Image: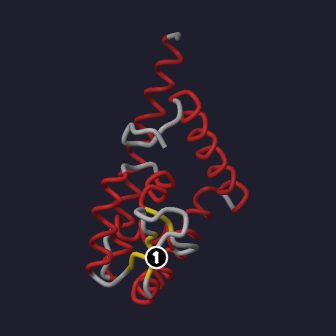
Amino acid sequence: MTRAQQDALSRTALSVFRLNGQFLAVSEKLAEPAGLTAAWWQVLGAVLPEPLPVSGIARAMGITRQSVQRVADLLVREGLAAYEPNPAHRRAKLLAPTETGRAAVRRIDPGHAELAARLMQELGGQEAFDETVRVLDRLSRALEAVDGPGAPDGTPE
């Protein structure tokens, strides 16, 4: 690896770390009026389309299964989500949002839509926004390819 490659990797990592912090901060602000935290919103958002096992949520979000389990248990305790039987695996229950959880996420929608519109404008339009997403997805896939398979907690999938 050349010095230029190492510098590019360091700049990329620092930018992504900063971006992660920025997204977490703005997510906390958006989620707070709905009675959620950014982590609660993230996990609920993962299961809005369909119920998923905790391990599937962790894989999709790129975080540890243990972190998702902790949040999932809190969501269930607060009545925002429920565990359902998993026909594919007896012990790995599926997490599904309750109507209360769906309603909480819907309360975030207006602020979320406003932020998306402002970001699109700042980036220079929808095409530029879409390209940003493609580049970030490509970076994620490339890192996964060079880092190898496995769950974020180091356990095999």
For the point 44% across and 40% down, the residue is 15
Nearer to me, 6 or 66: 66
For the point 39% across and 66% down, the residue is 27
For the point 52% across and 10% down, the residue is 2
Rendered view: 120 above or below 103: above
Q: Which of the 4 image quarters holds residue 40?
A: bottom left
Nearer to me, 123 or 30: 30
Nearer to me, 9 or 94: 94
Pinpoint residue 87: horizontal percent, then vertical percent: 54, 69
Indicate the secondary structure of the residue bearing disc 1: strand
Rendered view: 64 above or below 82: above
- Position of 62 with respect to 39 (left or right) is right
Pinpoint residue 154: horizontal percent, then vertical percent: 39, 37
* Residue on which disc 1 sits: 96
- The extreme right residue here reads 127
Badge 1 crowding class, 10 Å Cα cut-off, few under 14, some 14 to 19, many 20 or more, is many
For the point 40% across and 71% down, the residue is 41
Residue 81 seen in the figure:
yes
The colouring scheme, among rainbow, by chain, secondary structure or one colour, is: secondary structure
Total numbered badges shown on the rendered structure:
1
- The extreme front residue here reads 90
Callout 1, which amino acid?
A: Ala
Q: Which of the 4 image quarters holds residue 129?
A: bottom right
Pinpoint residue 69: horizontal percent, then vertical percent: 32, 61
- Position of 25 with respect to 97 (left or right) is left
Residue 42 seen in the figure:
no
Pinpoint residue 62: horizontal percent, then vertical percent: 45, 49
Rendered view: 128 above or below 95: above
- Position of 42 with respect to 126 (left or right) is left
